[in-house]
Amino acid sequence: MSLSGGAVPPSLRPMPSQVTVQDNYIDFNDLANGQWAQQYLPELYEAEVERYGNRTLGGFLRMVGAEMPMTSDQVIWSEQNRLHVAYDDVAIAANAGGFPKVDIVITPGAGNPATSGIRVGNTVLVSDNATGLITTKVLITALANPNGYELEGHVYEADNLSQLIGTNSLFVYGTEFPKGSEGMNGAIEPNVTTFTNSPIILKDNYELSGSDAAQIGWIEVATEDGTSGYLWYLKAEAETRLRFEDYLEMSMVEGVKNDNGGAFGTNFGPTGANNSQIKGTEGLFSAIEDRGNIYSGFAGAGAPGSGALGDFDEILKQLDKQGAIEENMLFLSRQTALDFDDMIAAVNGSYASLGAASYGLFDNEAEMALNFGFAGFRRGSYDFYKTDWKYLNDATTRGLDNQIDGVMIPAGTSTVYDQMMGSNIRRPFLHVRYRASETEDRRFKAWITGSVGGAYTSDLDVLRVNFLSERCLVTQAANNFVLFKGA
């Protein structure tokens, strides 16, 4: 066959029969020399390689809480205050009348009631703030002002009094009255502390043009929700949905209230949108930071398990001062989980005395398996169940930083007064409230708009899958939670 008219590039030599040789190969990518883009289709692997495994992060709140509807744009709940009267910031000074009289001045703090709750006839124990080792007992004999924040007292014992002049703490432990005296003046009115949170609106969408929808392409996948098979162009929609479901949980964990106020800019939201309504929402971390317990630098540095038990015992002492809830769950980053494993291993009998590991599986047979991890343990009067929290390890979420090492959450339920229902109710310590009514359920909405894929709602040549939810997290009794933070 001859070449003519430049129809075939000179670098090619057509063959009289269908044989593949070096000189008759047409390169589809060599457009500059007049060749085609591709001659042979590449070998195509249909199955998607799951190199990151299960990429979803959700499930944490489903493990520890519940979801319940609400009809309002604010949720209000009340929590009980402590039963006994105590103050931290108390100044003790010598009374002008001389010993054994003393003046006691209580500095009111945030949230203190109008009156102190300490009355004439109360007996109080005063201790120093520095060590808590120096104490004395005082009988309250007079109120220097009506609200009871300035008092006069009679010291029972002279010992240690000179060391208590300054800033101290006190609590009421009883009363004492002389014979024939009148009854106690005044009464303590129990009160509650009220907390509020507001739901936020979360949105996302996926769009596909009509032209792309007409170009069918298949890929074999195994999705994070357990299904598998071939997907057409809506594979990206499935991933958008999974990502949005993760956002629902991540927003409840990371959310913060908007303390700055004001609008968020004229270009935020559609025309007529009231940007001043952006209130934010109190997430789990924010609630514990504000009302719970913070422990920084758990286990510290050193050999495996070194210092971890002492750190953990300090946490137990703090739990004793709070609700003392017996069962707790630990959701930890990888490093903190290993610190807990090392801590438990260090006090394990065979490990500590023989320097050997404990055999975990298959009837403790040494040749079968070793268990270097612990799923649960008991310390003091508390039980703890430990698990890794993927959210703290993933490289695209909290695995990016070292601020949060884990969280301790009490198991079970709490009794609180619900302002809307007007009664005491039992709720999980953590639960999600979402907006819903008889006609509108905003827990998780998904709908299709456009003019592609069976939707005929507009003249836009797209298929648009819309997602929406409106929800907030209620963190009750946050004083029983512990947030582990990096040092």
Image (cartoon, rainbow, N blue to C red):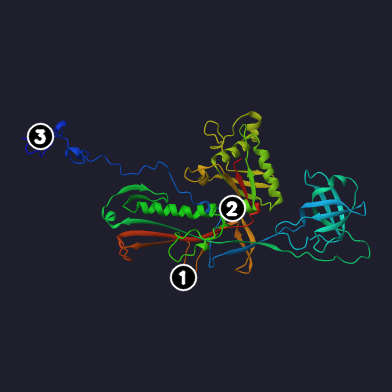
Say which amino acid is labelled 3: Met
Sequence-wise first label, 3 or 1: 3
**Quarter the C terminus occupies:** top right
Q: Are marks 2 and 3 in contact (CB under 8 Å)?
A: no
Which residue lies under the disc numbered 3?
A: 15
On the rendered structure, is 300 left or right of 215?
A: right
Spot occupied by residue 386 in the image (x, y as percentages of width and height): 58, 45
Spot occupied by residue 356 in the image (x, y as percentages of width and height): 60, 30
Spot occupied by residue 126 in the image (x, y as percentages of width and height): 82, 50
Name which quarter of the figure residue 162 lies in. top right
The one nearer the camera, 29 or 356, is 29
Say which amino acid is labelled 1: Thr
The one nearer the camera, 43 or 3, is 3
Give the structural element (helix, strand or loop) at label 2: helix
Mark 3 neighbour class, 10 Å CA radius: few under 14, some 14 to 19, many 20 or more:
few
Which residue lies under the disc numbered 2?
A: 286
Q: Find the residue positioned furthest to the front.
A: 266
On the rendered structure, is 184 left or right of 218?
A: right
The one nearer the camera, 168 or 243, is 168
Mark 2 or 3: in front is 2
Say which amino acid is labelled 2: Ser
On the rendered structure, is 29 left or right of 72?
A: left
Q: CA distance from mark 1 to mark 2?
A: 33 Å
Give the structural element (helix, strand or loop) at label 1: loop
Q: Are marks 1 and 2 in contact (CB under 8 Å)?
A: no
Spot occupied by residue 81 in the image (x, y as percentages of width and height): 71, 59
